[in-house]
Amino acid sequence: MVNESDIKIKSTREAFGKALVEFGRENQNIVAIDADLSCSTQTKLFAKEFPERFFNAGIAEQDAMGVAAGLSTCGKIPFVATFSVFAAGRAWDQIRNGICYPNFNVKIVGTHGGITVGEDGATHQALEDVALMRTIPNMTVLVPSDEVEVRAAVKFAIEHNGPVYIRISRTSLPTLFNPENYHLEYGRAQLLNTGWNITLVSNGETLIEAFKCAELLKNKGITADIINYPFVKPFDKDILLKSAVKTKKVMVIENHSVIGGLGSAVCECLSENMPTWVKRIGTNDVFGQSGQSSELMSKYGLVAEEFVSEALKLIEIK
């Protein structure tokens, strides 16, 4: 269980920018492409250190993906960074046909994922990006939960041959993992807490809320498995099935639409292999709105206090 007194809040976007610089020093084939958002995505750090390997495509995400595809055919490892809503939405056709269909070695980093984009409102809040990316053949999809996992995701993407989508939040997040021993294994989820009454599945910003929910449930005599899914695709079936056999109840918590994201992947797995009671918590097929990120998380029911009542209802089902 996470000890909140030991938690440090760190920017995942800055962690991405620093990781890109770190690995860029080791590998001269890494290049960065941005869509005029380098201050927001933190690719400005890479641009400052390697100006000859940084390309600003302007407000033209489709072109950015095309440039990345071309560079990948020349032996480069291109990282394209922009807001998740523009990467997954505006440039979806270029990603599908220009990157994934030929299986080019392009890495796409979508920052500002989920409802917590905040004041920019519905047009900038990517609630469908994971769903859009996981439908495309050859695409690997990651949703890291803290700065340590972001660095590991960038390292994985460099070493993995093929398209990768990494979704990063706008908000700074608590550091949940120890950088000295954290290991990200391709396509594998992680059991972070062991219980008997319910399985909590999460990733990204909501993983810390899953921990808080488990602590509140523990006060009521209820224990929970907590499974972190940094990889939404490929999806780790084994760890979920093993937990579901034990608890018989699964609750999925994500900063994404309940349609098509992690919750859908969980339901697909369980319905085909071991039908189980599942509660999906996310945005319920609605657009977001403008507001402070903390206010929006509360309004859309993405906080631990809201999860507890839903967990209790789920556990009571016979």
Image: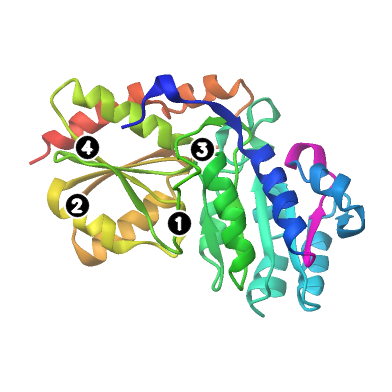
Under mark 1, the amino acid is: Val
Looking at the image, residue 304 lies above or below residue 187: above
Q: CA distance from mark 3 to mark 4?
A: 29 Å
How many residues crowd mark 4 within 10 Å: few (<14), some (14–19), many (20+)? Answer: many
Which-is-in-front pick, marks 1 and 4? 4
Instruction: Judge from the rendering whether residue 109 lies leftward or rightward of residue 203; answer left or right.
Output: right
Q: CA distance from mark 1 to mark 2?
A: 18 Å
Looking at the image, residue 125 lies above or below residue 93: above
Q: CA distance from mark 2 to mark 4?
A: 11 Å
Quadrant, the C terminus: top left
Question: Which residue extends farthest front?
Answer: 180
Name which of mark 3 and mark 2 comes first in the sequence: 2
Q: Which mark is residue 244?
A: 2
Q: Count how many numbered circles sit on residues in the image.
A: 4
Would residue 300 be counted in the magenta stretch? no
Name which of mark 2 and mark 4 comes first in the sequence: 4
Indicate the secondary structure of the residue bearing disc 1: strand
x, y (%) of residue 275? 19, 58
Numbered range of the magenta stretch: 28-41
Which-is-in-front pick, marks 2 and 4? 4
Q: Are marks 3 and 4 in contact (CB under 8 Å)?
A: no
Q: Which mark is residue 232?
A: 1
